[in-house]
Image (spheres, rainbow, N blue to C red):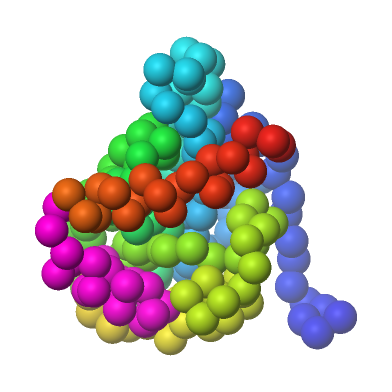
Amino acid sequence: MEYPDREVVCIVHDGSKDGKLNLSAIKSFSINVLVNNVGIGPMKELGQFSSTEIDETVTLNVLFPTHLTHSILAQLSRPSLILNVSSWAGIQPPPYLTVYAGTKAYNNAFSNSLSREVDDSMEIISLIVGSVHSAGNRAPITFFRPSSTVFAKHVLSIVGCGRKSVMPYWPHAVQTYLLSWLPGWLIDKAMKKAMEGPLKQHKRE
């Protein structure tokens, strides 16, 4: 083992069913870093959602990280870091991800607001994430869709930057900048077309 003196504690919990997590197993730990990286996003028209799907998406994406942060805030030693993983969908919402996009907009606002509450010994960053190849996104790796490993390295590189919201992978920022020059109707059309392939794939799965 590379770090034989490290201790790992696993807490099994379904955050989509219950937004509150029992943290008694780690109450004695000194914690410096919290990464809120959860998110599910059924891809379909809002009218096709079941009430259960809506509840589970909001519970996992919003209530779970909010309660977790609230519970662990006083336990964080200083200096400390909180990374809240938001999404590009939260600032430029695409079709067919209505509930997911709404929750990710919340993640960004929650992170920014909290960062203004705490003192300088705690850094809180909202990560605005574009498409990343992962277990949940099997689309092929490209220049604009990095692997999870590459993306993680970019995330680490922005720690200490002093900004509240950051696109850690710069090609995602380039995409966003170029998109900002387009008229609204063209953005709407391009987004809908871009989502057609993933929507069909999601339906097959």
User: Camera-side residue: 60 or 134?
Assistant: 134
Q: Main secondary structure of the magenta part?
A: helix
Q: Is residue 60 above or below residue 175?
A: above
User: Camera-side residue: 116 or 6?
Assistant: 116
Query: Total label count?
Result: 0
Quadrant in which the C terminus is drawn: top right
38 is within the stretch colored magenta = no
User: What residue span does the magenta drawing correspond to?
Assistant: 165-184
Task: Give the image quarter of residue 78.
Answer: bottom left
Task: Give the image quarter of residue 85.
Answer: bottom left
Q: In this view, does 175 lie above or below 187?
A: below
On the image, the x and y values in percent for residue 13 come to 66, 35
What residue is at 47 percent from the left and 13 percent from the top? 51
Q: Is residue 203 above or below residue 135?
A: above
On the image, the x and y values in percent for residue 73 come to 38, 52
| Left or right: 36 in relation to 79 | right
On the image, the x and y values in percent for residue 20 come to 50, 31
On the image, the x and y values in percent for residue 121 come to 28, 73
User: Camera-side residue: 96 or 153?
Assistant: 96
> Furthest-right residue in view?
1
User: Would you say residue 203 is visible in this rendering?
Assistant: yes
What residue is at 77 percent from the left and 81 percent from the top? 3
Quadrant in which the N terminus is drawn: bottom right
168 is within the stretch colored magenta = yes
| Left or right: 123 in relation to 56 | left
User: Would you say residue 156 is visible in this rendering?
Assistant: no
User: Camera-side residue: 105 or 81?
Assistant: 105
Q: In this view, does 94 lie above or below 4?
A: above
What residue is at 82 percent from the left and 79 percent from the top? 4
What residue is at 51 percent from the left and 54 percent from the top? 37
| Left or right: 31 in relation to 203 | left
